């Protein structure tokens, strides 16, 4: 299937939907919800076509659209997708569909604004994954911020200080972006182009390592904030805790990936030698993120906060893999490390996305996330227990589920290039198991079930779908659970594409 | 015969199917669930026998070199990682034991678990467990083995914490998972290193001489890589097979239902560690005096140490649990001394008689529970041997099966345990003869022999406490023999416990089992793959020790009255207390590992959110706010007052004057437009064209 | 022959146009406009653009001129008053138009155009169809939408809202 | 004919006072003169014959005899009427806008006559085979509207003006479905040339392939020529006589000529577009063997069809009652136009299905059913099925609306369906 | 003999100037509109003439002329609607009186 302008369609259909939603009367909530779900299905279907239409015999960038945009600045409207971005586009559209589906049942007030903003958010995220022009990239990068800011600020739970969290999230990211923009401009002044595909050949700042390092760090910090990497992570727990369920899902599932994507798409090709020079340093921070995030998770009593910190830990795996991929080593190990890093992004998207849905499921019923409030739910909510078990074990890296494959690849690659750091990082695996089993499973599901405690927190008045997971919630989780099992059992479905991209990216950079 | 081998991938599929069907469909129907599980494992058993038949027909070719079915699984750069299953002699031997024992346990459990609210869930879990173990056995590469290994870890977690309403049970599950996880991480690290160096994890490629040579020749951190990998892999086995110092989870695992204990301790989980070490033995053995001696040392310590704790326990299942630890130590001793065959032999026989003992104990517990129920007594712990006594008269079938199991365990001629344990001790004995006094084999032999004595002692104690004397509680007095579904598996297991030793009697030259050594042949020059000749002295010594220990225990506890002090406690005093508290290892671990970790976590969280990082962020934010206020003042007074308003006034004035041009007349505007364009055209023509 | 026809059409076109701007009667102005349009259709015929000629008549004569006539008739009072049609600045306007004419005259008289002597195959309809559904399809669609919007907009603007009887 | 023209042109060129290039220009002039004569002869003739025919047929329908005094069967009655009209006093009322008042009747007649330029009467006999013939017909129609408007306004009479407004509203409204129907025909024929359209009906007249289009075209054509039941603008009982109330004598005659010639044109083009024009039995054979015979046969066939169509028009006039003005407009905008659009879509779709690999010499992807083209007959069948489908859909929709609607007119249409 | 390009251009220029005069000098809105139509048509003539004489093998000139016509039609429709609305409001279409948008 070769659809012309497929990338533009994917990116701008949500925008169109957003505009249409804005013009719909706010009282027609049902129509707005259904319309949003339907409009979000189109990019999803198109992203499947993108996946199936990917040609492994061709070069890196496919589905290219390249037009002049602002000729005076040499800015181009350049979009393309490759094996790196297609899985992430797929992830974004999938999580968006699920978020819309889920939100359509649980969002009760200011429905129109919610869906309009969410659609706009989807456009911003998708745009980042396909933009191949630095200005376009920056444009989409910033566009995603505003809807997310509003989503957290307006639909956040009152007791979690949503405004504070939203502003923190916004300013934190913006600080990074400003530095990034300056670096982009510096690159433009040196090379005369904004084109991501053209800049690597010109090797910006190759003659001046100091300048290269400055530019590298300016961009890296912007991405590191988004990833987030220790010590730039404190916006994450606040934002996650305050955001509505779908917002958390998208935040964890996609927004964190923007940073990782940027590192691979921009930093590796632009600054291969600088990156390599700082790789050990970055890897150390990755390992710190892993272990530190796991430890902090272990000390949390708020379920959502716990999962937020676990994101820090899991994205540390990504950072380690990335650093290992650019460090001195044999090409095969580098590729494996990069495969692992990219797969870890995807897996983290579906697993942590699933986690946030599941927290939402519990929160909608009980309006609390305090771990001490639960207990013994395993026998009371068997379906919820089953789904949560799969997600939790996928998260802690049980073989046969998605998380394991990426951990294996990351550590395999990291071991070959930087063994000592990798061995230290392995400790995180034990800690992850500890906090997931001890905190989540044991406190929520195991132990004696106490009907009095449960009836005190279970909100019968506002929740009409029954105690155990309702069909719509199961449908929300089904694709994610299926993905976790499928990737765990047969990773080639996605690794084939990622591997193709990794080979090209590393092959041309080193 | 190739066709028969093609059935191999099916073996684990049946239990998996049973699991899936129960989880998604049949979990409302208890009876159906049980039959699905039993049917699944039954089909696996049949398939396994076909595969074994295929292996035997395949002769030396298949038994030694193995047969494989790889599929491309994961692209890594230019290379594709192959995932697959394989069968060789060793696998076939395991395939004889694992599904059969599982099948018997499942049948047993279908009665044992009756009345449990989560009956169906139980059978789903055990099916998954069986799936894990069978996959592990037929894996042809370390990665698939590891995956199955972890699936079993998951199942053990679920099953040990099956009665999660009990605080002790949910703790035990967590403990089991985390403790084995530590071992798993070591194994994982070893696997990574191995993978990094060799680019493959498939066993037959790993065991190629040139690969082994490369691994032993390369040094890392001062030791050969092969030794490092071996130690890390052994770490995994230590965790899984509950060797010292990671044995702490196993006694706690008794919190699970008794069939689970049997499953974990006999057929599946703990055997996996031994299986792994046996499978990877060529790698261990490639460097002389390298990793292998550590295997032997750990094995010897565990064998002795487990047995000592066993004599001080009152819980019937805990005694058996420590017995298992101890017996696994024996297997490790054998493997550590290079006695591949001895280790595997003991692994097979032990599976049968330990399953028998566990199921027997389950039957006893069930009976006592039944009795307690009968007399409306809900305080009696049905697992405490002190609450039993005189059960022989009430449950003869169980008792006889239990006697056979005990005899096999302590090594009474000619039951299975005699042959297999004797092989291990003989191995150590022979090597001691070569290496001399005070050498490692000597200590191993000593630990083994003392362990055998202690084993006999605590088994004698158990038999005495449980079956003889008078019932010490009302519950025990009303105990009742359970139904056929529980007793018939016991009898079948008893049969195997009695006869399985004959597959490798040392009177036939070289034994028979060595045909099933499989790919381990690759490194056979360092290993003992053939049965060693019968050592009369060893046999005599161990027989005397076993009989002595047994009768000592039996005699001491035969007529113990209710409320009477434990005779051994009287004899040993504080030592007994130490043993009873398992050398305080749990407490030690809590103090030095768990509490500091939790403390560190709390500190990190405080550091993150309350003390350092978040305050810094907030401070930066506040600085921004303050500078904003200052700027606002500056703005108001200087820029606004002087600059902006002045400019504004200027423009206000000009605007006032110029607005008169806005006449509102369209025609005027049009004329202006026309004249302006005309001027532009004129300028163009005049300045540029001219 | 052709110059003769050209002159006839020029008289129609330019004469009509002059009539439009000079006559005092708005209704005549509209009729002159139609005359001018018809002349232009003739121009198009001479320029080998028969289709365009037909379009010119259908759209300008059949639609726009009729619309203008309608508008004139609907605002009939204006005509009966017989006010002068010219505004106060008509002199300036005339001067501007004249200057414009003479300035622009410089273009056709001075520029050397890259003329081509090729003769088209004459199948202009096919070419037009291909162009409209080929390279110009997007402008074509946009213009369609524009027309639709103008249609609706005109209806809404011209609708007499005080009329209650409107269904 | 050609030879005659050339001879005349040569003659003209020889004693030429003609200032421009000789022979070709002369040919043009001769053609013009020829055409003018034809028009001047045919137009009054048509009016006379048609008036007589109409009166006779109407009389038969109303169970009367009709004109029967002047000449056999009263054939000269119409001629007498014509003479009467030409000799009457030509009154120009005071207060009229003289210029427009005088131009309007001529324009009406000219607009009606001019469409005959593209009428293919017989094989090879056509005024000029424009490649935009169909479009030309539509374009010329615009002048007809203009004439009505001019006449109505310049009469300085409120009845005339109202009549003109009504007329223009009606004409503009019905022009839309008519053009849509013509587009459908153009699509099927693949050409806008009238000659090509006739040539394209070798495999089945379009009446068979697209009967619904024929219906739409015929109905809107009836409205275009102001025939009953759409004769509102000259509804004597309501509007005196519509826009031409102030006209008399010769100018009135011109307007009448315009009207009847328009009717003739409508009948002719109905025949050309849907009834195969000059096509009939053995005509193909005749074209190949003897062109002269073909011309004769063509004329005969064509006149038969035109006569039939005229008869149908008169028949309808004698049968159906008049519409009310709002029903009339509703019928066009709410029924005919959507129907025509739907029909156009379906026809385009069916054509695409049967699309052979090439169109106007350009290679395009063949349709999925192009194998069933069968020399045009497969396509004809497909189009017919499409038409039936549209009719079913339309009647279902109308029924559904009519049940709910309070509008009696719509319900009447539904009942008619 | 074909007509030279310059004839067309001069004719179009004249037409344009006449239209311009009409636009500038009339105070009746409809008359202004008519002037505008004349100007648009002058442009059309230019487009078609250039197309005919410079690129006779292509129909680009005609295409643009058709677009201009379509837009002119839309413009006329809307403009006349506005004029009628204004007339209804003020009973006048004299643009000199429509000067409420002034200082």
Image: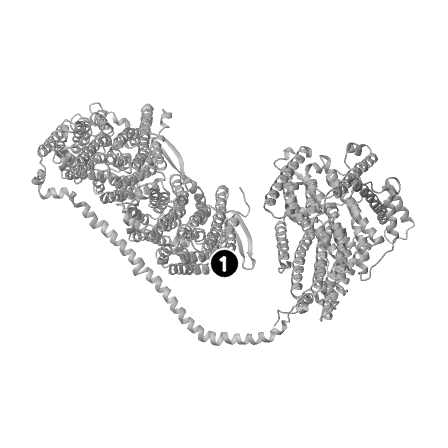
Residue pictured at 26% horizontal, 54% vertical? B600
Check the image and name the residue furthest to the right. D15
The color scheme shown is one colour
Q: Is residue C143 visible?
A: yes
Q: Residue D249: x, y in percent? A: 85, 53
Residue D3 placement (x, y as % from top left) = 87, 41
Image location of residue A473, percent across then percent down: 39, 45
Question: Can see residue E55?
Answer: no
Q: Secondary structure at mark 1?
A: helix
Q: Chain of mark 1?
A: A
Q: Bin the neighbour count of mark 1 within 10 Å (Cα to Cα): few under 14, some 14-19, many 20 and up.
A: some
Horizontal side of residue A411 vs C142, given as left or right: left
Q: Is E86 left or right of B132, judged from the image as shown?
A: right
Image height of D305 relative to A101, above or below: above
Q: Which residue is mark 1?
A: A188
Say above or below: B137 vs D174: above
**Left or right of A161: which side holds D28?**
right
């Amino acid at each position: 299937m070769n659809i012309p302008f497929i990338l533009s369609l994917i990116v701008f259909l949500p925008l169109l939907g957003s505009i249409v939603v804005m013009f719909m009367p706010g009282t027609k909530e049902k129509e707005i919800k259904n319309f949003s779900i339907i409009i979000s299905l189109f990019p999803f279907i198109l992203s499947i076509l993108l996946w199936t239409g990917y040609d492994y015999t061709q070069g890196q960038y496919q589905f290219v659209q390249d037009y002049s945009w602002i000729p005076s600045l040499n800015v181009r409207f350049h979009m393309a997708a490759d094996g790196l971005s297609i899985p992430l586009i797929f992830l974004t559209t999938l999580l968006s569909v699920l978020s819309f589906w889920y939100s359509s049942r649980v969002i009760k007030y200011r429905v129109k604004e919610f869906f309009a903003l969410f659609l706009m958010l989807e456009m911003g995220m998708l745009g980042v994954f396909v933009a191949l022009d630095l200005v376009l990239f920056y444009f989409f990068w910033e566009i995603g911020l505003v809807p997310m800011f509003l989503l957290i600020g307006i639909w956040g739970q009152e007791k979690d200080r949503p405004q504070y969290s939203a502003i923190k999230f916004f300013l934190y990211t913006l600080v990074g972006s400003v530095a990034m923009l300056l670096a982009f401009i510096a690159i433009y002044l040196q090379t005369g182009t904004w084109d991501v595909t053209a800049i690597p050949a010109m090797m910006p700042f190759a003659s001046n390592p100091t300048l290269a390092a400055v530019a590298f760090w300016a961009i890296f910090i912007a991405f590191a904030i988004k990833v987030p990497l220790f010590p730039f992570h404190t916006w994450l727990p606040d934002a996650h805790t305050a955001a509505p369920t779908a917002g958390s899902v998208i935040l964890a599932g996609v927004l964190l990936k923007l940073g990782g994507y940027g590192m691979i798409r921009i930093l590796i090709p632009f600054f291969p030698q600088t990156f390599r020079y700082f790789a050990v340093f970055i890897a150390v921070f990755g390992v710190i993120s892993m272990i530190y995030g796991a430890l902090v998770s272990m000390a949390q009593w708020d379920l959502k906060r716990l999962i937020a910190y676990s994101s820090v830990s899991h994205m540390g795996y990504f950072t380690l893999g990335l650093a290992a991929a650019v460090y001195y080593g044999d090409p095969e190990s580098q590729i494996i490390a990069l495969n692992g890093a990219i797969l870890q992004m995807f897996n983290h998207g579906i697993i942590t996305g699933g986690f946030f849905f599941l927290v939402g499921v519990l929160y909608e019923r009980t309006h609390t996330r305090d771990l001490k409030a639960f207990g013994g739910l395993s026998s009371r909510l068997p379906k919820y227990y089953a789904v949560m078990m799969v997600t939790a074990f996928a998260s802690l890296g049980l073989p046969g589920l998605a998380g394991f494959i990426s951990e294996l690849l990351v550590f395999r690659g990291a071991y070959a290039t930087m063994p000592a750091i990798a061995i230290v990082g392995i400790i995180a695996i034990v800690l992850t198991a500890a906090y997931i089993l001890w905190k989540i499973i044991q406190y929520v599901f195991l132990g004696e079930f106490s009907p009095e405690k449960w009836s005190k927190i279970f909100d019968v008045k506002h929740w009409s779908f029954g105690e155990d997971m309702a069909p719509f919630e199961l449908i929300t989780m089904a694709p994610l659970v299926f993905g976790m099992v499928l990737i765990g059992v047969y990773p080639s479905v996605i690794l084939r594409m990622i591997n193709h991209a990794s080979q090209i990216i590393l092959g041309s950079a080193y | 015969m190739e066709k028969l081998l093609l059935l191999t991938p099916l073996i684990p599929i049946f239990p998996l199917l049973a699991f899936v069907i129960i989880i998604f469909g049949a979990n409302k129907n208890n009876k159906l669930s049980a039959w699905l599980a039993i049917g699944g494992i039954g089909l696996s058993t049949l398939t396994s026998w076909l595969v074994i038949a295929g292996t035997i027909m395949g002769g030396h070719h298949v038994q030694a070199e193995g047969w494989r079915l790889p599929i491309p699984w994961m692209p890594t750069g230019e290379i594709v990682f192959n995932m697959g299953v394989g069968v060789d002699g060793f696998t076939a031997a395991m395939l004889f034991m694992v599904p059969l024992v599982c099948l018997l346990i499942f049948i047993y459990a279908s009665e044992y678990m009756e009345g449990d609210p989560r009956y169906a869930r139980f059978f789903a879990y055990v099916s998954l467990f069986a799936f894990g173990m069978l996959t592990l056995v037929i894996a042809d590469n370390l990665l698939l083995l590891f995956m199955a290994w972890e699936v079993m870890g998951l199942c053990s977690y679920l099953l040990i914490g099956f009665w999660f309403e009990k605080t002790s049970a949910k703790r035990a599950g967590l403990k089991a998972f985390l403790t084995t996880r530590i071992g798993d991480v070591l194994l994982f690290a070893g696997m990574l290193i191995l993978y990094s160096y060799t680019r493959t994890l498939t066993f037959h490629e790993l065991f190629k001489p040139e690969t082994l040579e490369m691994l032993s020749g390369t040094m890392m951190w001062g030791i050969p890589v092969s030794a490092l990998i071996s130690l890390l892999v052994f770490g995994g086995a230590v965790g899984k097979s509950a060797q010292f110092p990671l044995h702490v989870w196993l006694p706690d695992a008794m919190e699970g239902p008794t069939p689970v204990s049997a499953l974990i301790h006999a057929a599946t989980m703990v055997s996996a560690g031994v299986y792994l070490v046996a499978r990877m033995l060529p790698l261990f053995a490639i460097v002389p005096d390298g990793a292998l001696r550590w295997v032997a040392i750990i094995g010897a310590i565990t064998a002795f140490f487990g047995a000592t704790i066993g004599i001080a326990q009152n819980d019937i299942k805990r005694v058996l649990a420590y017995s298992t630890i101890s017996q696994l130590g024996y297997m490790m001793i054998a493997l550590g001394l290079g006695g591949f065959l001895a280790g595997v032999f003991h692994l097979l026989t032990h599976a049968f008689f330990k399953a028998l003992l566990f199921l027997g104990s389950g039957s006893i517990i069930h009976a006592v529970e039944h009795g307690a129920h009968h007399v409306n007594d809900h305080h009696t712990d049905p697992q405490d041997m002190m609450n039993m006594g005189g059960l022989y008269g009430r449950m003869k079938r169980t008792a006889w099966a239990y006697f056979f199991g005990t005899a096999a365990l302590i090594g009474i001629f000619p039951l299975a345990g005699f042959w297999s344990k004797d092989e291990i001790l003989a191995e150590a004995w022979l090597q001691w003869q070569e290496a001399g006094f005070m050498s490692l084999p000597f200590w191993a032999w000593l630990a083994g022999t003392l362990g055998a004595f202690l084993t006999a002692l605590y088994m004698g104690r158990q038999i005495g406490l449980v079956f003889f004397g008078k019932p010490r509680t009302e519950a025990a007095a009303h105990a009742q023999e359970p139904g056929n579904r529980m007793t018939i598996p016991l009898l079948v297991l008893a049969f195997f416990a009695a006869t399985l030793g004959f597959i490798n009697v040392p009177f036939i030259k070289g034994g028979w089992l060595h045909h099933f050594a499989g790919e381990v042949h690759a490194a056979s020059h360092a290993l003992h793959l053939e049965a060693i000749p019968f050592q009369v002295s060893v046999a005599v010594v161990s027989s005397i020790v076993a009989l002595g220990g047994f009768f000592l225990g039996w005699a001491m506890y035969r007529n113990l009255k209710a409320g009477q002090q434990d005779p051994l406690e009287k004899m040993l005093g504080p030592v007994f207390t130490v043993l009873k508290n398992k050398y305080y290892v749990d407490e030690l671990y809590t103090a030095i590992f768990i509490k500091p970790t939790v403390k560190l976590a709390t500190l990190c969280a405080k550091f993150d959110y309350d003390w350092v990082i978040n305050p810094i962020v907030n401070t930066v934010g506040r600085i921004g706010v303050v500078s904003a206020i200052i700027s606002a003042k500056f703005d108001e007074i200087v820029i606004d007052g002087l600059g902006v308003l002045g400019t504004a006034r200027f423009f206000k004035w000009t605007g006032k004057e110029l607005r008169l041009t806005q006449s509102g007349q369209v025609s005027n505007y049009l004329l202006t437009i026309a004249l302006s364009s005309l001027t532009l055209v004129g300028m163009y023509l005049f300045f540029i064209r001219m | 022959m052709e110059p003769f026809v050209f002159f006839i059409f020029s008289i129609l076109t330019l004469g009509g146009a002059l009539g439009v701007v000079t006559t005092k009667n708005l209704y005549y102005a509209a009729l002159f406009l139609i005359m001018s349009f018809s002349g232009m259709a003739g121009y198009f015929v001479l320029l080998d653009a028969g289709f365009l000629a037909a379009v010119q008549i259908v759209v300008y004569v059949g639609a726009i001129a009729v619309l203008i006539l309608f508008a004139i008739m609907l605002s009939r009072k204006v005509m009966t008053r017989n006010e002068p049609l010219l505004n106060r600045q008509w002199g300036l306007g005339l001067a501007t138009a004249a200057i414009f004419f003479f300035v622009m005259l410089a273009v056709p008289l001075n520029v050397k155009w890259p003329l081509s002597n090729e003769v088209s195959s004459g199948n202009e309809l096919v070419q037009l169809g291909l162009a409209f559904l080929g390279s110009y399809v997007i402008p074509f669609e946009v213009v369609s939408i524009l027309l639709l919007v103008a249609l609706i907009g005109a209806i809404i603007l011209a609708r007499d809202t005080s009329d209650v009887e409107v269904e | 004919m050609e030879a005659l023209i050339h001879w005349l042109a040569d003659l003209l060129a020889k004693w030429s006072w003609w200032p421009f290039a000789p022979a070709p220009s002369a040919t043009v002039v001769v053609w013009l003169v020829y055409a003018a004569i034809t028009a001047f002869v045919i137009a009054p003739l048509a009016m006379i014959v048609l008036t007589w025919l109409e009166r006779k047929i109407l009389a038969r329908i109303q169970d009367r005899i009709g004109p029967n005094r002047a000449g056999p069967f009263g054939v000269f009655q119409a001629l007498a009427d014509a003479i009467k009209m030409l000799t009457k006093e030509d009154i120009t009322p005071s207060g009229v806008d003289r210029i427009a008042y005088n131009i309007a009747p001529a324009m009406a007649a000219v607009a009606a006559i001019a469409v005959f330029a593209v009428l293919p009467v017989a094989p090879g006999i056509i005024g000029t085979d424009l490649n935009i013939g169909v479009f030309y017909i539509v374009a010329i129609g615009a002048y007809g509207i203009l004439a009505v408007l001019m006449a109505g306004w310049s009469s300085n009479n409120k009845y005339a003006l109202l009549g003109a407004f009504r007329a223009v509203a009606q004409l503009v409204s019905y022009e839309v479905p008519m053009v849509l129907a013509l587009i459908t025909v153009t699509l099927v024929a693949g050409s806008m040339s009238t000659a090509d359209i006739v040539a394209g009906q070798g495999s089945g007249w379009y009446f068979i392939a697209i009967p619904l289009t024929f219906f739409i075209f015929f109905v809107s054509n009836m409205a275009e020529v102001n025939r009953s039941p759409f004769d509102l603008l000259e509804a004597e009982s309501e509007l005196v006589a519509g826009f031409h109330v102030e006209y008399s004598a010769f100018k009135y005659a011109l307007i009448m000529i315009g009207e009847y010639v328009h009717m003739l044109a409508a009948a002719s083009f109905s025949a050309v577009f849907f009834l195969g024009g000059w096509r009939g039995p053995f005509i193909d054979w005749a074209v190949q063997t003897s062109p002269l015979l073909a011309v004769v046969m063509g004329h005969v066939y064509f006149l038969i069809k035109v006569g039939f169509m005229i008869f149908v028009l008169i028949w309808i006039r004698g049968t159906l009652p008049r519409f009310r003005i709002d029903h009339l407009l509703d019928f066009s905008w709410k029924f005919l136009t959507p129907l025509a659009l739907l029909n156009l879509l379906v026809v385009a779709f069916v054509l695409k299905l049967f699309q052979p690999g090439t169109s106007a010499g350009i290679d395009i992807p063949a349709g999925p059913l192009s194998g069933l083209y069968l020399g045009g007959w497969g396509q004809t069948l497909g189009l017919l099925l499409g038409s039936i489908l549209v009719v079913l859909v339309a009647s279902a929709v109308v029924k559904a609306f009519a049940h709910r609607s309070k509008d009696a007119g719509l319900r009447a249409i539904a009942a008619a369906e | 003999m074909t007509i030279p390009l310059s004839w067309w251009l001069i004719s179009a220029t004249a037409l344009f100037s006449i239209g311009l005069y009409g636009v500038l000098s009339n105070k009746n809105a409809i008359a202004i509109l008519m002037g505008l139509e004349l100007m648009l048509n002058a442009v059309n003539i230019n487009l078609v003439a250039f197309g005919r004489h410079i690129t006779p093998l292509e129909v680009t000139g005609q295409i643009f002329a058709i677009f201009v016509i379509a837009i002119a039609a839309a413009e006329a429709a809307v403009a006349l609607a506005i004029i009628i609305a204004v007339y209804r409001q003020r009973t006048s279409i004299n643009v000199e009186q429509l000067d409420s948008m002034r200082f």
